[in-house]
Amino acid sequence: FDQKAVTAFKKRNNLEDKKIILFSGRISEEKGIFQIIQALDLVLREIPNALLLVAGSGARLDNVNLPIRSLGWLGHEEMKIAYSACDVLVVPSLIFDSFPTVILEAMAAKKPVVGTCFGGTPEIIIDGETGYIINPYDIKTMADRITDLLKNPEKAGEFGKKGYERARDFFSLKHQAETYLSFYVSRKHALG
């Protein structure tokens, strides 16, 4: 993405010199917002310049004495910039999200993802290769995985690169159309 746009985004939102943990989605208990806030508290012990960037709407995050920047819902182009500006996307959903597209969007921006073990997330992320799969109720492990990626930019970059390749190779519109077509052709032959 255009580095000038990313720099301007960071400056406009006071994100310069920060390690940015992005949460994108509805701000609610079901989406794991309280778990990520608890994890942030642990991350800050090792990475004092970490910050949680929240792109979404819902519950207010008042009275949280931690570095959190809540931007509300962002448009499509602004979200692309947010993905490019972040260091890691965290998807700590406690509910069955069948296929969180925010993960693919972050992977398309070559960003690593720390994602929930619930729902369809484990079908998207390859644990230890494109990101980490965590149980969002295990706050310490979530914090450890986030910290690992923030402390090791080479590893985060490699996860991001592999995530991009996975999104391109397995989740593109072309690949999905070919998969469906193949399924229907094989069913047609099987049924005679």
Image (cartoon, rainbow, N blue to C red):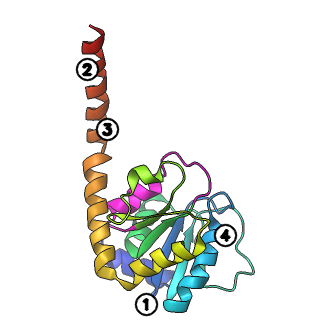
**Is residue 103 part of the magenta span, yes or no?**
yes
Q: Earlier in the sequence, mark 3 or mark 1?
A: 1
Q: Quadrant of residue 68?
A: bottom right
Residue 48 visible, this orientation: no
Q: Residue furthest top?
A: 192
Q: Earlier in the sequence, mark 2 or mark 3?
A: 3
Residue 100, horizontal then vertical, whole percent = 49, 52
Residue under label 2: 185
Q: Are marks 4 and 2 in contact (CB under 8 Å)?
A: no
How far is disc 3 from disc 1 in space, using C-alphas?
39 Å
Q: Main secondary structure of the magenta part?
A: loop
Disc 4 residue type (three-letter): Phe
Residue at the spot x=55%, y=49% of the render?
97
Q: Earlier in the sequence, mark 2 or mark 1?
A: 1
Which of the two residues, 21 or 15, is positioned nearer the viewer here? 21
Q: Is residue 174 above or below residue 7?
A: above
Q: Earlier in the sequence, mark 4 or mark 1?
A: 1
Q: Earlier in the sequence, mark 4 or mark 2?
A: 4
> How many other residues sit within 10 Å of disc 4, few (<14), some (14-19) or many (≥20)?
some
Residue under label 1: 17
Quick check: 156 left or right of 32? Answer: left
Residue under label 3: 176
Q: Quadrant of residue 7?
A: bottom left
For discs 4 and 3, the disc positioned in front in the rendered view? 4
Q: Earlier in the sequence, mark 4 or mark 3?
A: 4
Disc 2 residue type (three-letter): Val
How far is disc 4 from disc 1 in space, using C-alphas?
25 Å
Residue under label 4: 34
The local secondary structure at tag 1 comes to loop
In the image, the segment drawn in magenta is 93-112
